[in-house]
Amino acid sequence: MFGTREELCLELERMFTPSEPLLLLVWTPGSVEAACDPEEQGVSDEELPSLMAALGDIPMDTYQEEGVTREDVRRLLRFMRVASRRQVTVPAALLNRVIDWAVREVTARESQCFEAGQPVPCSVTLLGEDLRTLKARAA
């Protein structure tokens, strides 16, 4: 999971009973930065939220079986950097349809949070920002 303390607490409330014992391991921005290899430029302020969101998307069964190590953080950052430079060609009409659909989904998720009186998760906010950037580039 990735989000603010408040968002994570709400998600934990939904997932577990109040008396259920848990073991919680926390990665902060500082600990993720420290895990990144300074010889590979470390992690930039722009990359950090996406890296933390990607780490938070690791399936529970995966990190329970394999853990998340410094090398995993570094490998994921390298993968993100390669992926960010990769270019593909798609028809503009297709790209715009996908962007429009995704914007509607993000808006619906934001509305659900608002109606429930809950904060919008960081991952949803980041996705909305990415979609606005993509829409501007596709124009």
Image (cartoon, grey):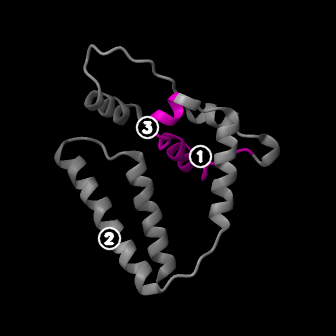
Q: Looking at the rendered structure, which numbered label has been put on residue 28?
A: none
Q: Secondary structure at mark 3?
A: loop
- Image: 65 above or below 90: above
Q: Is residue 4 visible?
A: yes
Q: Earlier in the sequence, mark 1 or mark 2?
A: 1
Who's the residue at 34% across and 74% down the image? 100
Which secondary structure type mostly characterizes the magenta part of the structure?
helix
Residue 91 in picture, x, y percent from top left: 48, 86
Judging depth in this view, the residue of 57 and 113 nearest the camera is 57
**Residue 109 part of the magenta-drawn span:** no
Disc nearest the viewer among 3 and 1 = 3
Residue carrying label 2: 101
Q: CA distance from mark 1 to mark 2?
A: 26 Å
- Image: 79 above or below 137: above
Residue carrying label 3: 1
Disc nearest the viewer among 1 and 2 = 2
Amino acid type for the residue under numbered disc 2: Trp
**Residue 44 part of the magenta-drawn span:** yes
Judging depth in this view, the residue of 79 and 60 nearest the camera is 60
Q: Earlier in the sequence, mark 3 or mark 1?
A: 3
Residue 34 in picture, x, y percent from top left: 69, 33
Residue carrying label 1: 48
Dot 2, crowdedness within 10 Å: few (<14), some or many (≥20)?
few
Residue 51 in picture, x, y percent from top left: 57, 47
> Which residue range is magenta in the image?
42-64
